[in-house]
Image: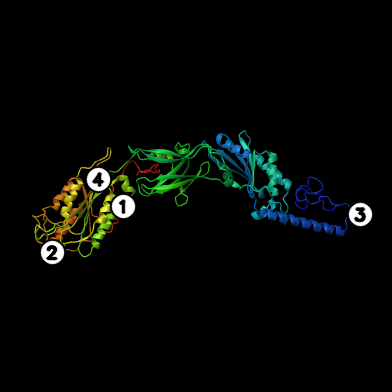
Amino acid sequence: MIGGSNDGACPVCHGPQGGRGFCTSCRWRLEGEVFLGGPTPDDLRREEEALAAARADWDEQAAALAAGDPGPAGEPGPAWDRLLEELVEHPDAVLWFVELTDERVGLIRAEADRNGIPHTVDLGGAAWTALAPEFAEDPADRAFQLAGGIGTRPPVDRAALDDAVRRLLGTLLPHGRRHRTVLLTQRPDWPLLARAAEAARTLRSPDAQLGPVSGGMAGVRLLLRGAPLHRDHSLVLADVDALSGAVRPEAKLLFPAGARLRPGETVTVPVTVHGGVDADTLVTLPVVAAGSGTPHDAVSTHGVRLPALRSADLTFVLHGPGEVEVLLPDGSAAEPVRDDLGTIIAALPRRLARPPRLHLLLAVELGYGASPDEVTARLDYARGLVTALSGPEGAAAGVDVGLVGYYDHHVRESRYAPRGTLLDTLPLGPPATALAALARWRPQRRRRDTASALEDALQALRRLATAPPWTPPGRARPQRTVLVLGARPPCEWAEHGQGPVPACPLGVDWRAELAGLREAGVRVLARRDGPADERPSELALQPLWDHTELAWHTIGTDGTLPPGQPPAATALDLLPPWHVDGPPCRLALARSLL
């Protein structure tokens, strides 16, 4: 008999014969022809050549199978869907995943917590090299063997491998009414993995069979993403009461209970969150199950930096129960953080009190000496300041702006000569009105270099600032601030005006007007053009220098702005602060404070 085998295995693929005629795996003829007197040498040579060619062809198919694509995974089916529903709905349900991969025979246990979030534990198993010594250590060579290849190594004993798989799973698998078994085969098209799967089925009939699938914990987690949500997944934000300012947590529903994903599917929900009163704050975005907001219900937490009083459009992506990703406006993913939600909620501020309105009065010197650019720079600064106060921070507090533009006293040759413009005034009102007025103001060449009509401007500012304002119920009185933008000092009062320091023709005392502003609770700030000159050596000019330095020092007692400070920084310094009763808020706000 030529081509047969007497060791119980096919001479080509080494699978058990299990019958007569042809091998069920490789279709090699197991029983040769019967010759009277026995085969001739030519018969033996032809048979050996045919056997060698069959073995080479079989190994070539195995190599292609090992290197090839397993193909798309099929739909899990209703049995798998029922197992997932049982896992999240019954607290004592357990899924035992028997995995057959290119590395091992393993067992992974999956359970769900009280919120229906699956958790997995790798219970170990055995590598193929431990189950059969013929397996290669090299992953590529071992994949070739699992795909049925023989090559130059001793063939794997198929029957012994079947027994080893059954013994291993017999010691690992428990028994119980709620202990369901899922058979995962990484490559069902590989003959030795298919044999191992059949051996596992003879030990215990699986409740579901899946393959081809990825192996290991990561592969099992991907499969568990298809479980339905047992509870709502909600985002915890902070809500600020519009009237009292009380701060309390609020849950915003993202993904409702019962939602489930198909393999590879995600669900996205856009959410606009709002920053609080602290600049560039790292806030926590906790997603909780059932919206209860208790620490053990947090399923994910991410950290995001939010500018003060600004909004951010975020995208929440559901990958599975308890798996939520947060995408920032630029498309990048927010970083997960390990913050305790209970601690964050317990440390929320008790109250956020809106700041008082800002009443800002600007005094701008409109006279120039060498170039109109002097006045243009002051007007640009004033416009930049008012524009910055029109932003979100200013809108949150509420800002009113008034203006006083001041020039010089005119010397009239007679009482019939026309009067020159001394002041341009604008009462307190919206920032847009002040911007329109500033756009109309023009520089004017000054008539004297020693002093301006600043004392008259201070008098006008006092009248504007001390007019009784209307204050809404529950709001603090407005914070009143005067900012002087100029270069020359005021004229002296008539009794003090002598020598090079001119006196005010109208008899206005700048010291009295300044004192009246501060007695009324008005803060007066100064921004003087450029650095102060050195004290002159000429005795005749020293009184004027002393007067100038004293005047600007006195005007800027409440604060002097450095010439290089940008208008936006000045706006932030001028705005009244929010009153936070308690620690900073570490949650994003549900609604804008504007």
**Against 539, is 175 above or below?**
above
Residue mark closest to the camera, 2 vs 3: 2
Quick one: label 1 or label 3, which is nearer the N terminus?
Answer: 3
The residue that disc 2 covers is 541
| Residue 190 relative to residue 301: left or right | right
**x and y percentages locating residue 6 in the rendered image:** 81, 49
Q: As drawn, is 274 to the left or to the right of 501?
A: right
Which residue corresponds to mark 3? 37
Q: Secondary structure at mark 4?
A: strand
Check disc 4 and report the residue beneath it.
479
Query: Is disc 4 in contact with disc 1, using a CB cutoff of under 8 Å?
Result: no
Mark nearest the camera among 2 and 4 is: 4
Distance CA(mark 2)–CA(mark 1): 40 Å
**How far, Cα to Cα, is label 1 from label 3?**
111 Å
- State yes or no: discs 3 and 4 in contact (Cβ < 8 Å): no
Q: Which residue is mark 1?
A: 388
Q: 83 above or below 38? A: above
**Residues at circles 2 and 3 in contact by the CB criterion of under 8 Å:** no
Residue lying at 47% horizontally and 50% vertically, measured from the top left: 333
